[in-house]
Amino acid sequence: MSVSLRVASWNIHKGVGSDRRRDLERTARVIAELGADLVCLQEADRRFGDRAGLLDLDALRSDCGLVAVPVDASGPMSHGWHGNLILVREGIEMRHVRPLSLPGLEPRGALVAELRTAGRPLRVIGAHFGLLPRSRRAQARTILDRIDEMEPHPTLLMGDLNEWRTGPSSPLAPFLRHFRPSHAPRSFPAPLPVLPLDRVMVGPVGELHDIAAHASALARKASDHLPVTARLVLP
């Protein structure tokens, strides 16, 4: 019997919306709208200083049933790693999480979480790629190198990959060695999206269905990116 999960990725822009207001309660309401079992967030921590986390994790747990995957390598005030945060629905087993520094001129990173759902292993990678194409290509290869070092498991990659191109010339082309091609909906800028910067991919097994940008009225105001959602089916 297959297992189906609703998944989502969203760059929350530190809670600052298209109206230039920081409203973290609004951010939390959009997360609740997604109704997801797995969520990868980007820019969930302050970038400088103590890199403190911005969300009320206790409220997300009580209101949405979502629990933050703990990251030991972060600062004491941080939610995640380089702003990346993974939320999982209560009942999904968290086994291990590994922070991964990504190469490039900007400080970027990814989280690699080993989970089990319905008794089956699932690897989830939440990432935020850089603004330079050569950095994005190197960051994709770094993630693939880490996957090659690990046991083979279904792997779900989600994040703001800052890349709109597809095909062999894309900096994301190395991912085709492991991940299946998937639809990339337009997600940026949120009020009138024209670029597919936010991605959801799975490989080497598993299927993604109903990939879409979550374009509610609230989501269009809550960040400069729209959330991207999908239904993951594991065989």
Image (cartoon, rainbow, N blue to C red):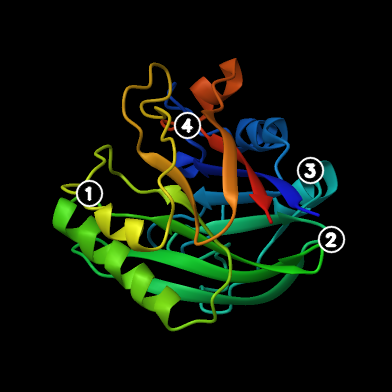
**Is disc 2 in contact with disc 4, using a CB cutoff of under 8 Å?**
no
Mark-to-mark CA distance, 3 and 2: 13 Å
Judged by depth in the image, the label closer to the viewer, 3 or 2, is 2
Residue at image point 74% right, 68% down:
120
Question: Would you call the spot at circle 2 few (<14 residues within 10 Å), some (14-19), or many (20 or more)?
Answer: few
- Which is nearer the N-term, disc 1 or disc 4? 1
Q: Position of residue 73 (x, y in %)?
A: 51, 79
Residue, x 43% and y 84% (percent of image)?
A: 149
**Vertical arrangement, residue 120 with respect to residue 83, above or below:** below
The correct choice, above or below, for 217 with respect to 223 in the image is above
Residue beneath disc 2: 91
Q: Are marks 3 and 4 in contact (CB under 8 Å)?
A: no
Disc 1/disc 4 C-alpha distance (Å) = 18 Å
Can you give x and y, in whole percent of width and height, for residue 41 in the image? Answer: 53, 49
Q: Label 1, on which residue? A: 131
Q: For the residue marked with disc 1, what is the amino acid?
A: Leu
Circle on res. 223? 4
Q: Nearer the viewer, residue 107 or 202?
A: 202
Residue type pointed to by label 3? Cys
Q: Are marks 1 and 4 in contact (CB under 8 Å)?
A: no
Quarter assignment of residue 135: bottom left
Instruction: Decide which of tag 3 and tag 4 comes sooner along the chain.
Output: 3
Few, some or many C-alpha atoms within 10 Å of disc 1 (few <14, some 14-19, many ≥20)? some
Q: Quadrant of the C terminus?
A: bottom right
Q: Is residue 48 visible?
A: yes
Q: Alpha-carbon neighbours of circle 3 within 10 Å: few (<14), some, or many (≥20)?
A: many
Whole-angstrom CA distance, mark 3 to mark 4, is 19 Å
